[in-house]
Image (cartoon, grey):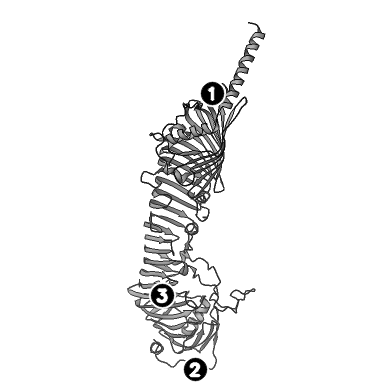
Amino acid sequence: MRPSTIAKIAAALLLALVVAVIAAGKSLNSETYNHFLAERVKAATGLDLTFAGATKLKLGPSPVLSFTGVTLTAGKGGPLLYIDRVEARVALVPLALRQLRLESLTLLRPVLHTQKLSALPQIKPLDLGGASDGTPRTQLALSGLRVEDADIRLSNGTIQVSKAQFTPETEAGGPLSLQVDGRWRDAPLSLSGVIAPLTALGGAKPYPVQIKGSVGTANLTLRGTITQPLAGKGLDLELHAQGEEMSDLLRLRPGKAPIPALGPFKLAARLTDSAGPLAASDIDAVIGRRDSQLITVKGQMADISEQRGVDMALTLEAESLTGVMRLLALDLPNAGQVKLSGHLSDIDNGWRLTGLKSNLGKSDLAGELSLVQTPHPRLYGRLSASQLQLGDFSLPPPRSNGSGQPSQPQHPAIPIDDGRILPIDALALDLVRDLDVDLSLSAARLQMGPAHVSDATAELRVAAGRLSLENFTARSGEGRLGGELRLDTMAKAPALSLRLAGNGLDPAPLTGGSLKGAKADLAFDLKAQGSNLRIMAGSAEGNLALTLGETVMGKDWGGDFPARLSRDLAGAQGPEGLRLRCLVARLPVKAGLVSLDRGLAAETASSAALASGSIDLRSEVLDISVAGRTTPPLRIKGVLGAPILSTEGGGKPLSDAAPCRTAQARRLAR
């Protein structure tokens, strides 16, 4: 056959194809075809399918069938899915035979309301075979599904999909490879992987998924099955995630306040919803860095969205408690290096930590704690320690200066060194107002600077801005110590009251070994008001009483000034220090003025001394005379931080034969 003949035949066939395609295009009735599609979709899914405009077939080498304003609705209420425009590429040759063979689909600007997926009935296979009214037979032979500018609306936010591509293994179907790019709460979202065919979405078998990708700075993988994928139910997925900053991932939670940096993380868990809510089991997470803050978590959570059913083993290693306090949005007392372990569970509006074992600085704590976060934070439980050093803990700085005298600046522009030692820094009272507390405390050894006591117990309570340390008891040697402390931050000026009493106490533990020997009795009863220690001291009211028997005062006790005073009064000291027969102090305090008049006395084997005068805590000014039995009278002037000792000429030696008895006889107001 001649080439010219072949060309003529090909041209004739092409012309016939074009004529047939044009005829098929003109024969497509938009209203009839839309009605046909709506009936078939209703039969398969129970959903109502509507169109906002006419369906059009654009002819050409690659014909395109387009739909506008496509809406799927499940019963009454708003739409389940709205698509602004759908474009389907149609095979040319089947079209000439009046068959719509759809080779690809593009969904433009769809909006999916996922909260309505749960109302979907069981989906049946979609039959698009031709109808008796001449509607063309429609066949899905998709080589790809493309989505552009989609919104996936969840109950707590919207996932914005800029583009997504779904590609089947073959034209006949098979597993779909996917690539999705978008944003979630202003963080970039990118997913890729393999899922089962779309035709299996409504099947009875679990729908397999295998996805990897990134959300923000976190990388994740999901592998498993979904029994009801269209309804988002029947999950059984293995999750693995890791990233450089855990807080970046947690910030993606809707409705949650930003949290501080936590460091890198690795997370593995199994996600299921067999009991209803989305749950996580086999949780194994490591968060942070060992050189700053490291948190490990193992366990399960029965309801992720509500954070309920928590059952986790928790460990923490950190340089301080700062990160944990920021995570809880609380200004709790801080501590040095921390090691902590316990079992974490949830309670109504809060958390419980049981089996607590911790090392904070040089202190160790064990017990259980519960934190209720709303409506007002409340911490309660019990803590015990074999050793508790108060110096390991520091209070958060106050949010305001809290002045007691507004007319005077709390911090002068030019610091003045006037020898005063009582600080003017505002007391850290915010914690008392922000947090309610009910704790039972005990410590085998309670360390306060150089002093310590044994077997200490107390009840710490904070409520409505009022703090109380009640039922305090402790042991020093064979003697017992007891008392209470109360602080009212809601008064016009913060008010403090302190009561402390003990009999038969060993003075060595109470003074860091500076006083050794006989037993001691003490009684402190003080009240004060003010927003800093200087103002409180200046308003102090009450009594101070101390009685010591045979005691050795160490050479280095109190520094140079007490050593010089002891030397001037008693002469040369022994190798152990100054040996006292007795030391008595019975001092009333009135409006910040401590009266020493014949209320402070000491005796040695060869000498004795009796003090008079006062200490003005309002100005820290000293005005004290000390009469000695064998030495000239001494005068102490200056201020607490810089006392000046001098000999008082013309004074008479002490004539009192028993100054300790004289001081002991001084009556104090109750």
Above or below: residue 420 compared with residue 299: below
Q: Would you call the spot at circle 1 few (<14 residues within 10 Å), some (14-19), or many (20 or more)?
A: many
At label 3, which amino acid type do we have? Leu
Q: Nearer the viewer, residue 512 or 333?
A: 333
Quarter holding residue 11: top right
At label 2, which amino acid type do we have? Lys
Report the residue marked by disc 1. Answer: 98
Quarter holding residue 646: bottom right
Which mark is nearer the camera, 3 or 2? 3
Mark found first going from the N terminus, 1 or 3: 1
Q: Quadrant of the C terminus?
A: bottom left
Q: Would you call the spot at circle 2 few (<14 residues within 10 Å), some (14-19), or many (20 or more)?
A: few
State the image coordinates of residue 669 (x, y, percent, origin top left): 40, 88
Report the residue marked by disc 2. Answer: 652
Mark found first going from the N terminus, 1 or 2: 1
Question: Is residue 539 left or right of 410 when viewed as pictured?
Answer: left
Report the residue marked by disc 3. Answer: 485
Q: Nearer the viewer, residue 137 or 327?
A: 137
Asked if one can make out residue 406 in the rendered structure from this viewpoint, the answer is yes
State the image coordinates of residue 206 (x, y, percent, origin top left): 39, 35
Above or below: residue 377 compared with residue 19: below
Mark found first going from the N terminus, 3 or 2: 3
State the image coordinates of residue 258 (x, y, percent, origin top left): 52, 55
Q: Decide: marks 1, 2 in contact (CB < 8 A)?
A: no
Above or below: residue 321 compared with residue 6: below
Which mark is nearer the camera, 1 or 2? 1
Q: Nearer the viewer, residue 38 or 503?
A: 38
